[in-house]
Image (cartoon, helix red, strand yellow):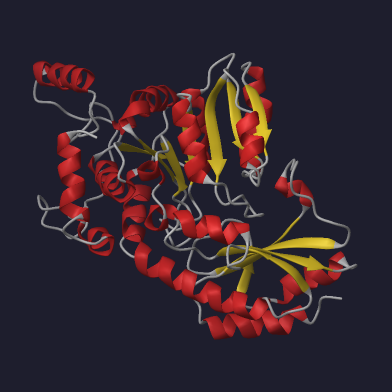
Amino acid sequence: MDIAFSDFVIKYFMKKSVKTYLKTAAKDYSSRSVNPPVVRASTILFRTMQELRKFQKDFISKKTPEVEHWDYGRSGTQTTLQLQKMLRGLEEAYQVFLTPTGFAAVALSIMSICRPGDEILISDGVYRPTQKLTDDLLKEFKVKTVWYNPNSFEDFRKKITRKTKLIYVENPGSNTFEMNDLGKIVSLAKSKNIFTAIDNTWATPYFFKPLKLGFDIAITSATKYYSGHSDVMAGTVAVNKKVYEKVWWYNHLSGYRLSSDDAYLIIRGLRTLDIRLEKHQESTKKVINFLKTQRKISKILYPYKPSSREFKLFKKYYSGASGLLSLIIKSKSKNSVYKFVNSLELFGIGYSWGGFESLAVYTDPVELGTRRYFKLEKNEHLVRLHIGLEDSKDLINDLKRSLKFIK
C-alpha cells in the first residue's frame, strides 16, 4: 500500500467510522453538490498535444490508480472515478475496477490471471456461470480447472500442484452456503506464491474485507447490495498492488466499462449500505427463528446455528450476515413446493437479490450446476429466499400461511 493511499485509509477509518465514510465520500466540491455529477463522455479533451502525451507518459510511468481524468472515455469519467475512490476506501484496496455486470467482474478476475498451462483451483459451490466459464471456456485455452471440497481443508491442500496459478473461492457457496476456512486458504496460497480471488457478494466489504485478510482479488456484484434498489447491473473487482497491473492490462484490452449513469446509481446505493445491511440481517434472524420451528423445513442453509462448522467459520471472519438464505424442504410433491412459492404475497419470484424487496425462487438441481460435494436427497427441494426491508412480522406471516401448501 503506497503512502498516499495509506493516508487515505487512516483518514477515514481511524478517525471516522465506515458508516460516516459511506455518507461523506464522493462529495463534489467543484460543483458544490452533495453528489458527484453524471459525466457522460467518450472524448476527453486536452488543451494541447503536449498535455495529452504528458498524461499518458505519467500514467504509464507512475502506474497509479490515482488520476483526475483519463485520456479516453472507455477508461471512465469523473463519475466512475468517484465511485472507484469511494470503493477503494470501503474495500481498503489499491484499486477497484468497475464492470457492467457482476459476472463480468468474475470473468475479469479469472482471465486476468490464468494462462495456458495453468491450473485454477475452485471451491465446489460457486455460481453456475462461473462453473461454465472455468470448466468450458478455460478448457479451450488449455487452463485446467480443479474442484475442491469447501468443507475439507485437507482436500483443498492436497489438490494444489506446482501448476496452480489461481485459487478461486465463493464464500459462502452459491445457494448452498458452504463456508471455507479463508485464513488457512490465504496462508497456504501465500506460502506457495499462488494468487487468490474471492466472490464476496453475499457479505460485501461492509461485513468482511477479503484484501485485509490477504486475498489478492475481491469480487462484488454491485447489482446486489451496493445498488440496493434492483435497478442497475454492475460489478467490482478490488485488488491489491501485487495484481493491479495484471488486472488493469486485461481490463483495458477487454474494454470493460461501467456507464456513468450506473456508477451514479451505485454511489447513491452505497450511501445507505450500512443501514440496509443491518436491517436485512436483523430481519433475517427473526425469519430464521420462525423457520427453524417448522417441521416441513428439513434444513436452513445459512450460518445461524452456533454448534455448526459453518457458524464457527462465519464468526471467525465476518462481522455480520446478509439477507440471503436457502431452505431444504422435504416433500414428495414438487408442485406443492411450487405452490408454496407461488402463494407468497410479499416475496417476488425472480432472480438476483440484494434489493429492498424480498424474493423467493425454487432452485432446480440444474441451476446449481455440477456439484461434487452437495447433493439433494430424494424428495428434497431447494428454495432460495432473500429477506428484504419489509416488516419482518409481515414476512413471517406470509411464510406461515404459504407453508401450509406443502404436502
Left or right placement of residue 190 versus residue 132 in this view: left
Q: Is residue 180 above or below residue 189?
A: below
User: Which residue is more in the foreground, 106 or 198?
Assistant: 198
The residue at the point 36 percent across, 69 percent down is 275
Whether residue 101 is visible: no
User: In x, y percent, where is residue 228?
Assistant: 43, 61
Q: How many marks?
A: 0
Side (left or right) of 123 relative to 103: right
Q: Position of residue 288 (x, y in %)?
A: 61, 74
Instruction: Give the residue drawn at x 20%, y 59%.
Output: 24
* 239, above or below 389, in the image: above
Q: Quadrant of the C terminus?
A: bottom right
Q: Is residue 192 rendered to the left or right of residue 310?
A: left
Q: Position of residue 251 (x, y in %)?
A: 40, 28
Nearer to us in this view, 39 or 215: 215
Give the residue displayed 62% in from the left and 44% down from the top: 127
Vertical order, 262 against 142 (above or below): below
Which image quarter holds the N terminus?
A: top left
Corner quadrant of residue 226: bottom left
- Tell me if residue 206 can be seen: yes
Which residue appears farthest toward the top when viewing the image?
117
Question: Which residue is nearer to you in this view: 128 or 79?
Answer: 128
Residue 78 location in percent, x, y? 22, 41
Q: Is residue 214 above or below residue 58?
A: below
